[in-house]
Image: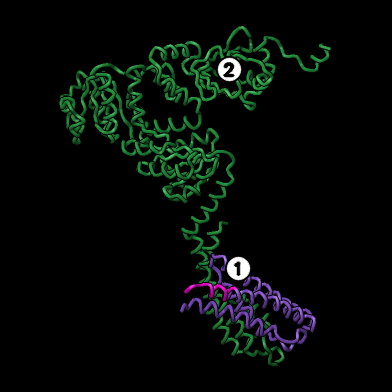
Amino acid sequence: MNLEKVISGFFIILAMTLNFGFFYGEPTDTTLHSTYELFLALIISLIATVLKIGDKTQIGSVLLATSLVADIQLIAAVLVWTFAQYTGEVDGKTTATIVSLSGGALLANITSVILYIGETLKSKR
Amino acid sequence: MNDNALWIILQRLRTPLLVLLVSYAISILGLVLIPGMDDKGEVYQMSFFDAFYFISYTASTIGFGETPYAFTYEQRLWVIVCIYLTVLGWFYAIGSLVSIISDKKLRLEIMRGRFKTRIETIKGEFIIVLGYNYVNAKIIQKLLHADLNVVLVDAKEDKINEFLLEDYSKSVPVMVGNALTTHMLIDAGIKKKTCITVIATFYKEEKNLRIAILTKFLNPKAEVIAKSTFNEISTSISDTDIVHRENPFEIFGKRFDIALTSPHVLILENWIYHNADLSDNTIYLPKGKYIICGYGRLGRVLKEQLDKHEMEYVFIDEAKIAKRDMKEPKSLLRANADDKEVLLSAGIKEAVCLVSGTQSDIDNLSILITAKKLNPDLYLIARENTMEEVSIFEAAKINWIIMLERILINKTSLQLIDPLKHSFLKMILNQNELWASTLVNLLKNQLGANPILIALSISEKSAYAIYHEIQLGKNIPIEVLLTSLKDRSNKHKAIILLLKRQGKEILLPQNEFLKLGDEILFACDQEAKEEIELIASNLYDLCYAYLGEEKKNWLFKKIFSS
C-alpha cells in the first residue's frame, strides 16, 4: 500500500463528492445549497490540484488539467455568489447560475476520478 | 521559460502551497463559524467574503484592523491562532520560493532553455568552441571579428562568467556544461546542418579524442579541429577521418625544417600570419652546432629534423631518456641545463644556436641568460608555454620564440576565417628556396615590405560586374583586374598569388580567363585594393579596364544605333 496514493486518491474523490453534495437539489432553491459545502468543495479541489502537480506523464498532465478546470468553475461560482450577495440579492436566478457552474466543475471532477481509476487499474502492481 | 525549469519550480512548491491552502482554509472556516457581535449588540455570523478579506491582510502582515465590526473575545482568541498559522505559512512559502530561485540546478535549467532557443535562432553556419582557455579565447576573438557565429560551452561557471565579462561585438550563446557528454553537444546544436566545425583544444588530450569520436557519430559532416601532441592519441584521432588534427610540435618541426632549407618560405608565412613583414631576416638559422635544452615532445621533433639535415647537436635534459631514443650517448647530457658548467661541457663556446625548450618559462629564460653570457653570438630559440609572459620574452631579445599556443591560434583561425589564405600557405610550404626568395623579392620590390592580402570571389555578390559579363559569354582575362584605372596602359600595385577553381589551385596564375565561382588571392597595397574592388563590381570601371573605352549608356546606345 502506498500512502501517497491513498492521500491523493482521498482528496480527488472527496473533491468530487463534496462538489456533488453542493450540486444536488433544486437549482433555483437557495436553501438547498450550503455555502459551507461550496467552500469545502473549493478548498479540497485546490488541494487535489496541488497534489497532482509534478507528475510529468501524459495521464498526470490530463489529471492536472481537469483539476484546473474544476477550480476555475468553482472560483467562478464563489465570485458570482459574493457579487450577488453584496450588490443585490441572491435570488433563484443567481442560485441557478451558481449551481450550474458547480455542475460544470462536477463533470471535470468526475472525469478526473475516472482517469485516476483507469490509471490505477492499468498499473500492474 | 523552458519546460524543465517550470516543472522544477512547481514540484518544489507543492508542499508550501499545500501548507498555505490548509492554513487559510482552517482560519477562514473558524472565523465564519465563531459568532460575533455587530455595532448594535446583535449576534451575527461573519460571511466567507469578510473572513477571506480579513485573513488575506492578516496573513500577509498588512493588518488593516478588525472588520466589519470590532471582534469579540472568542473571535480574538481564534485570530491569534490564525495569525501564527498563516503568517508562518507565508514565511515558509516565500522562503522556499527564494531558495528555489537561487537554486543552482534551476538556474542551469533556465540557462539551458535560453541557450537552446538561441541556438535555434542562429542564422547561418556556426562553430562550436568547447572550453574557454587562452587559445580558444583568441580564436573566438578572431572568429567574431570575421563575423562568424560562435557557440561556447565550458564546464565551469566561472569561466563562462569570465567570457561574458569580455567585450565582444557579437553575442555568443554560452552554456555551462560538460562538453564530453552527448546531450550537451546536442544542446549546443551539433546535429544541425549549419554546424560546420567543432573546436576542441583541451589540455587533456583524451578529451579531444572523445569529442572527435562523438562528433563523428552525431554529425559526420561537421569538421573537428582537435589539438593532439601525443602519438597514440593522434593516431586514434586521425582514424575518425573527420578531424583536422593540430599538433603544434609537429607544426613547429616543419617550420624548423623549412627554416634550415628555405627560410624565405617562412618569411612568407610570417607575413601571412601578420607576425612580421617581408623584410624580417631573423629566420635565417646558422649552420653549426646546436644545443637543445629539454628532450620532450619538442626535443624529439627537433632531433628528427637535425638528424635529417645532418647537423651536430647536444641535448641536455634532467630526466632519464629512453635508450632507444639516444643511440649516441655523446649527444646527450643528463644534467640541469641551467648550470654554467653543464653548458660549457656541452660546448656552448663553439655552438651557434641554443634552443631552450623546457616546459618551464622561467627555466627557459634563465638558461638563455646564462648562455648569452657565455657566448654572446648565439642564435637563441626559446619555447614559451604560457601566453601570460609574452612581454618578458619579447624584451629578452630572443631570435625566435616558439609559442605553441600562438601556433594553434593562428593555424585554427586562419583555416576557418580565410580558407583561401590557408590553401595558399599550404601550397607555398612545399616550394623551394629559389621560388620563395623570388616571390619575396618581387613582393618587396613592387609592393613594399608589408603588402596586404585580399581575397576576391567571382560571385554576383562580391564581383557583380564581372559576374554579369561572364554570364553574357565574354572571356575576361584575369589580368584585367590588375589594370590601373588611372591609366589603362599601366598596372596598379598588385600581384595575383593564387587562383582557386573548382577545388584546383593555381599558384601565380597567368593567362587565365575568369570563370564563375573562381576565388582569387591578391597581394596589393591599399590603393590597389580599392581599384580591384571597383573593377570587379562596377560595370563602367570594368568596361574601361577591359576595352579601354567608356561604357555607353544603354539609352544613348539605342538612340545612336537606330
Give chain B's shade. green
Task: Kindly identify the amino acid type of the residue bearing the numbered disc 2.
Answer: Glu
Residue B236 image point, x, y percent: 35, 39
User: Is residue A123 shown in magenta?
Assistant: yes
- Which chain letter matches label 2? B
Viewer-nearest residue: B46 or B323: B323
The residue that mark 2 highlights is B527
Q: Quadrant of the C terminus of chain B?
A: top right
Q: Secondary structure at mark 2?
A: helix
Viewer-nearest residue: B312 or A105: A105
Task: Kindly identify the amino acid type of the residue bearing the numbered disc 1.
Answer: Val
- Whether pointer 1 and pointer 2 mark residues with C-beta atoms closer than 8 Å, the reply is no
Residue B381 image point, x, y percent: 30, 25
Mark 2 is surrounded, within 10 Å at the Cα level, by few (under 14), some (14 to 19) or many (20 or more) other residues, namely few
Viewer-nearest residue: B325 or B525: B325
Q: Quadrant of the N terminus of chain B?
A: bottom right
Residue B209 lies, with reference to residue A68, above or below; the image says above
In the rendered view, how is the structure colored?
Answer: by chain
The residue that mark 1 highlights is A62
Residue B84 image point, x, y percent: 53, 79
**Range shown magenta:** A115-125
Give chain A's shade. purple
